Amino acid sequence: MVSGRKRKFNEQTALQAAMEVFWAKGFVGASLADLTKSMNINKPSMYSAFGNKESLFIKATQHYIDNNMKAHLGALYAADIPLKTRLKNYMMSIVGMQCSTEQPKGCYLVLCQSEVAGGDIPAEATKLLIEIEAAPKALLAKLFSTDKEAISLGLNENSAGNALSLYTALKGTAAMARSKVPPTELEFVIDTMLTGVFSTGKSHAIPSPTLQ
Amino acid sequence: MVSGRKRKFNEQTALQAAMEVFWAKGFVGASLADLTKSMNINKPSMYSAFGNKESLFIKATQHYIDNNMKAHLGALYAADIPLKTRLKNYMMSIVGMQCSTEQPKGCYLVLCQSEVAGGDIPAEATKLLIEIEAAPKALLAKLFSTDKEAISLGLNENSAGNALSLYTALKGTAAMARSKVPPTELEFVIDTMLTGVFSTGKSHAIPSPTLQ
DNA sequence: TTCATATTGTACCAAAAGGTATTTTTAAGT
DNA sequence: ACTTAAAAATACCTTTTGGTACAATATGAA
């Protein structure tokens, strides 16, 4: 193998720390001093391990997706659970993360995506943040357009709109969570939006059975 | 009167320009160079007229409230218009602002309030941003608890929750608007949340008329 | 026309920003 | 034990940050 001094820090641990700084402060607001202090390494170690601030951010963002977004997906496809319940479990799982005391409140992505418009985020990072935006919308839209129950309720007729409604609600709860609104209150918000989606679906989709 | 050289710039115009920079970049992201360039004045003029970055921000925030928030309130209290319609008009008026091409997209306050948790906003400004948060929630809650129609629909029974749902939806649309989602799509989201609020109200509030 | 005063423009300051060069330390391979 | 190589620590670089001193320039009052 190659010789040389061994790394004192664990790359994943350092990345987790960096992620939490970006989560709390955004890309622009997070300084290298903030980052390296929280990662417990010095600047040259950071640069040799991660490249520069932008590529550290890109890796931290990927780390966030892998460790804080994907875990919720399971709830969406659980067997033998009504669609509305699956959606609620999915959304409340995300809300729980947004309100967790173990990590910064709110959503990493909502904050950083809102920084994009300011024009101070480098090109590659901007591209990633914009791409990420599409995924959950597409995922929910696909669910609404393919799920048996969704189809029988007519929710497939505006799958994109229904997905957008839920996604928007989650962006809203992210902002509220950052302002320390507790998850118990946000649960009511989620319930309300789900009620709206499901009752809109019905009114649009259920034709009179006696006709046609 | 007092003598001396006359001001070349209009204070309100300069404040409007500063507001737009904070709106696009947040408090942390907006540099004095950004601000003074957009205000078309130099730093000493800025400092003599507005104090420092923090007090400029406080004045810009007040300017935002006066010029971009208060205008929507009329819709809430319009006579002879159903409550649901009034709420929709109010919310769509805000969404229209969030999506306007005349100003930065999204909401000034949502961005800056999300910066508070980062800890880099000075004390007075932080205090203001937190105070502001309470007003629209209280306003909607009061409407739900006092409006005749709201009471008859039972929406007063959870006026705070209903207010929170709508407020959260607006925070969500602010984030979506910043990502350039068009108002036509956000209108569907607003409709859905309103449907949720009103149908939740009904299910809670309408007791079986044959009983009791 | 002079005088006092307020605003401007330029130049400047110390601190913090992102990023590196260089030296010191630590480890593995021989 | 000695070399080689990689990581760490310190010091440093340039640019930008928020904020000012100071001289130049207008303006109304006397």
Image (cartoon, coloured by chain):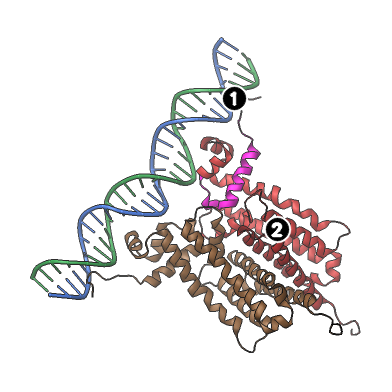
Chain colours: A brown, B red, C blue, D green
Q: Quadrant of residue B192?
A: bottom right
Q: Is residue B42 left or right of residue A199?
A: left
Marking on residue B15: none
> The disc labelled 1 sits on which kind of residue?
Gly
Q: Is residue D23 left or right of residue A187?
A: left
Q: Nearer the viewer, mark 2 or mark 1?
A: 2
View extreme (front): residue: A212
Question: Badge 2, how many Cα within 10 Å: few under 14, some, many 20+?
Answer: many
Q: Who's the residue at 84% across and 84% down the image? A: A209
Magenta range is B3-32
Q: Quadrant of residue B132?
A: bottom right
Residue B148, percent across and down? 86, 65
Q: CA distance from mark 2 to mark 1?
A: 45 Å
Residue B210 higher or lower than B68, as above or below: below
Q: Is residue A147 magenta?
A: no
Marking on residue B95: 2
- The residue lying toward the viewer, choosing from A207 and D28, is A207
Residue B160, percent across and down? 73, 68
Considering the whole magenta stretch, tell me its main secondary structure: helix
Question: Badge 1, how many Cα within 10 Å: few under 14, some, many 20+?
Answer: few
Residue A9, percent across and down? 33, 70
Residue A135 visible? The answer is yes
Q: Who's the residue at 86% across and 66% down the image? A: B149
Residue A202, percent across and down? 77, 78
Q: Same chain for marks 2 and 1?
A: yes
Q: Chain of mark 1?
A: B
